[in-house]
Image (cartoon, rainbow, N blue to C red):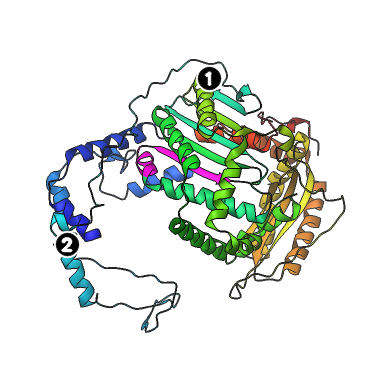
């Protein structure tokens, strides 16, 4: 297939219109590129400085295309020949006969000439006449997602709004909206929450929901490729209480992609062959999940132990073999038949646009209203003060020599600002001494972390350690550190305590870097239904 496509490229000269289209996309993406963290920017720029680029191109670097050169493109195509390539084969099964070992890790491998019969097939494919090639091969078509309207109505504001406004709230839908008044870019983010009680009713329904969302993404793969090239992205996922649909990018064509994703969700035909492929992928994902490093697995168990309704990979994997294509078809009809829609719209759009998008979602899927009494509620177990629970789990991978503990201390109700403030301040004070004691001095392992932990309805403080030492030993060392730190806290001066408070305040009030970061902050409050959009806390009132 690859060499047939190379032959197709050789049949005609490089197309300048394709270059100009790609150049236009690159120019737009560079012009409206969002700010990134300083460290990432420095790393990327320093890498570009090692290349023979004109110094005035260091910021645009390889982000832009500058000149169409037909001869140079043709020269590159001419290098793609059957006598000028190598192929790497990866298999789930050990074929035997490997005669080499990699120097550092002893990884076995084998290098050999491409078999003559296979090479003959490749050469034959490369020489095929146009009428003999695969009919599906073609040059790119025109990308209809490329934005053309970049107008931004910028108005001077004394102070940007800190929260979105509720512009619709009825039995069918709830819509939150905020016009971008900070970054002034021609972009928008739309996040939709399809609330339903059957998504996570059991491990089996959760697996069927996962397969459905994977099939939607599978069906949209080709269509969404052009959108992605033009700076538009989407995602479909699910959680314990809802399906999530997110569309983001340049606002000019955003509604076009949203409508297509909604129609695919509604009209998806679940075919047996694609179902089996997606099901097999999910099986591999479940199997691999249980072979992750121990520190990557422990968080799922913490969530499972504390949530009212949650499942672990083992429970999903047990249900998967019994799920059929027909079962997913029935589940899809039930799922889309009755839901509550919650929408968040943020960016270079107006209130009327947010309401129109809500109408588009409602009219496309047309679900029956879900009464508020049937909305899934965020609930979790409350651990009694002074209680001490230990849950032990043996890793599925016998070759993994690492143990891991998450030592979690519950600090109180997540909705209590003072609880959050105190926990975050404790994080500020503990992080450096905990790392120094447990990682640097005691050398318990490479993964040593402490910090605030946000759970379903509770706030907590945790220590996470992965080590070859036994969990009981790790727990004893955390106990010892807590005792050590409590003495340091008793001896801490008011000046040092005040410095920690000021540092936390600066960190919490740090200016947002881009539109996405503000959207994430708003959506976390909408999705959890805490609606505490003001991050200002009563830190100055805290006393040592």
Q: Quadrant of the C terminus?
A: top right
Residue 498 is one of the magenta-drawn residues: no
The image shows residue 465 at horizontal and vertical percentages of 67, 61
Left-right relation of 375 to 141? right
Q: Is residue 349 left or right of residue 377?
A: left
Within 10 angstroms of label 2, few (less than 14), some, or many (20 or more) residues?
many
The residue positioned 65% from the left and 71% from the top of the image is 468
How many marks on residues?
Answer: 2
Query: Can you say which quadrant of the picture contains the N terminus?
Result: bottom left
Residue 311, given in percent of the width and then of the height, sits at 68, 56
Q: Find out whether residue 224 is within the magenta segment.
A: yes
**Depth check: 311 or 301 in front?**
311
Q: Which residue is mark 1?
A: 351
Relative to 146, residue 403 above or below:
below
**Rendering quarter of residue 232:** top left
Q: Secondary structure at mark 1?
A: helix
Left or right of residue 342, residue 51 in this image = left
Residue drawn at (45%, 54%), measured in percent from left and top? 271
Answer whether residue 513 is visible to the viewer in this image: no
Residue 317 spot, x, y in % from top left: 61, 63
Q: Which mark is residue 126?
A: 2
Q: Residue at x 73, y 45 (%)?
A: 426
Q: Quadrant of residue 358?
A: top right
Q: State whether residue 442 appears in this view.
A: yes
Q: Earlier in the sequence, mark 1 or mark 2?
A: 2
Q: Secondary structure at mark 2?
A: helix
Which label sits on residue 493?
A: none
Give how far across and how far down residue 62 sits, in percent: 30, 44
**Magenta-tinted stretch:** 223-238
Above or below for 104 versus 404: below
């Amino acid at each position: 297939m690859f060499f047939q496509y190379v032959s197709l490229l050789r049949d005609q000269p490089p197309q300048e219109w394709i270059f100009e289209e790609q150049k236009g996309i690159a120019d737009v993406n560079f012009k409206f590129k969002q700010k990134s963290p300083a460290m990432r920017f420095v790393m990327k720029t320093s890498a570009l400085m090692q290349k023979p680029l004109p110094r005035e191109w260091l910021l645009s670097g390889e982000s832009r295309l500058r000149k169409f050169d037909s001869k140079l493109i043709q020269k590159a195509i001419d290098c793609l020949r059957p006598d000028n390539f190598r192929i790497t084969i990866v298999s789930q099964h050990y074929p035997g006969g490997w005669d080499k070992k990699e120097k550092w890790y002893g990884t076995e491998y084998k290098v050999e000439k491409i078999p003559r019969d296979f090479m003959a097939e490749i050469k034959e494919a490369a020489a095929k006449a146009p009428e003999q090639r695969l009919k599906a091969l073609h040059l790119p078509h025109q990308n209809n997602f490329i934005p053309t309207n970049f107008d931004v109505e910028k108005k001077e504001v004394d102070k940007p709004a800190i929260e979105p406004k509720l512009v619709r709230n009825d039995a069918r839908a709830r819509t939150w909206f905020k016009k971008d008044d900070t970054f002034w870019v021609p972009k928008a983010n739309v996040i939709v929450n399809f609330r339903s009680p059957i998504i996570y009713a059991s491990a089996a329904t959760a697996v069927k929901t996962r397969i459905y969302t994977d099939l939607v993404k599978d069906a949209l793969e080709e269509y969404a490729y052009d959108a992605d090239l033009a700076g538009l992205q989407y995602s479909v996922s699910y959680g314990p209480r809802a399906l999530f649909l997110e569309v983001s990018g340049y606002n000019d064509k955003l509604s076009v992609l949203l409508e297509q994703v909604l129609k695919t969700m509604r009209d998806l035909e679940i075919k047996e062959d694609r179902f089996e492929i997606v099901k097999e992928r999910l099986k591999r994902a479940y199997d691999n999940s249980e072979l992750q490093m121990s520190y990557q697995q422990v968080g799922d168990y913490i969530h499972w132990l504390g949530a009212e309704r949650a499942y672990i990979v083992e429970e999903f994997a047990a249900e998967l073999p019994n799920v059929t294509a027909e079962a997913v078809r029935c589940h899809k009809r039930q799922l889309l038949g009755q839901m509550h829609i919650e929408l968040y719209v943020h960016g270079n759009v107006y209130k009327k646009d947010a309401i129109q998008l809500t109408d588009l979602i409602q009219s496309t899927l047309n679900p029956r209203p879900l009464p508020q009494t049937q909305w899934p509620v965020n609930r979790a177990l409350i651990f009694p003060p002074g209680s001490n629970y230990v849950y032990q789990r043996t890793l599925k991978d016998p070759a993994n020599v690492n143990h891991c503990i998450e030592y979690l201390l519950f600090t109180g109700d997540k909705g209590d600002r003072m609880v959050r403030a105190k926990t975050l301040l404790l994080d500020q004070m503990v992080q450096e001494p905990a790392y120094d004691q447990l990682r640097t001095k005691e050398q318990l392992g490479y993964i040593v972390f402490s910090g605030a932990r946000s759970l379903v309805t509770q706030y907590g403080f945790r220590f996470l350690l992965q080590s070859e030492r036994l969990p009981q030993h790790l727990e004893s060392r955390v106990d010892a550190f807590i005792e050590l730190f409590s003495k340091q806290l008793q001896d801490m001066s008011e000046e040092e305590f005040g410095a920690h408070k000021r540092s936390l305040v600066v960190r919490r009030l740090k200016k947002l870097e881009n539109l996405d970061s503000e959207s994430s902050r708003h959506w976390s409050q909408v999705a959890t239904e805490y609606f505490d959009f003001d991050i200002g806390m009563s830190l100055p009132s805290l006393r040592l």
